[in-house]
Amino acid sequence: MTSLLRLDRERTWPLLSLVMVPACFFGLSRVVPLRGEHFLVAALLMICAWSSKGRKFSLILAPLTATGFGYELFPLFAGLRGKVLVEQLWDLEHLLFPIPGSSTVSLSDLLSSFSWAPLDLLAGATYLTHLPEAMGLAALLFLRGDVPRAQRLAVGFLLLNVVGWCIWLILPAAPPWYVDLYGLGPIDLSAAPSCAGGARFDAFVGHPIFASFFERSTNVFGAFPSLHAGSASIAAIAGYRSTRGTRIFTLSYAVAMCFSAVYLRHHYIVDVVAGIACAFAAYAIAGQLLSLKDKGQRALVPHARVGEAI
């Protein structure tokens, strides 16, 4: 009987994936235009369904995939956001991170006031790869057999972004580049997304990679907290107790991301600090949720054995 159930499950999941995954993506296409990366993820999910190990990995991939699609759907809730903060965040930045002797220049202003081609390349490449970095780390941990840490990273990543999106709605905030272009006056809700310092990355590589990415931005006023900094930070937290090479890479990537967010003029330092704090909170909550899940599963084991004995 057990072998028949296993055989049925091994046949059913792949067949269901051939129906459910395209159906979900068709539903998404009614809201946002599908792009190449969407089809790539759909293909990956369907391929994973054809093996037991692949199905286990798809459970880890699911929260990360949901994060990407959740961001695409953010405009549906944009009408719920509160008053956009412009001058308030600018004042807070200058209060907490001032340049001695100046009341109009903050540390973030200073960091973004100069440019160097190698830094432009590093910052641009870092800023564009926060989601692939998290997915790659989750896959690496899974392949190494550290499934609990991979699960915690994936669930924490989703929680981090959900919390960030909620803050974006409650406390929408203008990024530094908006102040550079429009000033601290009345908010212009029609402002188009800008790649800001990312334009230097595009000029360096000779192709509008950064511009094409940010012209699809679903929320101009999502500066606080910085989910780019948060995403890199939660990956560094998950990778800290892994191998030495993983620890060095994820920590270095997180530092580079925090610097890039400010250097490219997309975030203030206060945004970055808030993103890091959200990352620690999300990772801690994810650990508690998964711990409760494990305890619940262990509590069911004795009952299952009794049922089998009867």
Image (spheres, grey):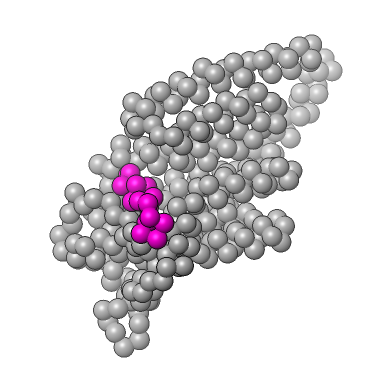
Quadrant location of residue 291? top right
Quadrant location of residue 174? bottom left
Up the image or down, 85 lies above or below 148; here it is below
Q: Residue furthest bottom?
A: 101
Camera-side residue of 249 and 119? 119
Viewer can see residue 281? no
Q: How many numbered badges does the structure rendering display?
A: 0
Magenta-tinted stretch = 201-219
Camera-side residue of 60 and 110? 110
Left or right, 136 with reference to 210? right
Quarter of the figure with the N terminus: top right
Q: Residue at x 66, y 60 (%)?
A: 247
Quadrant location of residue 185? bottom left
Q: Position of residue 114 (x, y in %)?
A: 36, 74
Q: Position of residue 265 (x, y in %)?
A: 34, 64
Q: Position of residue 260 (x, y in %)?
A: 44, 64
Quarter of the figure with the C terminus: top right
Q: Residue at x 34, y 32 (%)?
A: 33
Camera-side residue of 251 and 284? 251
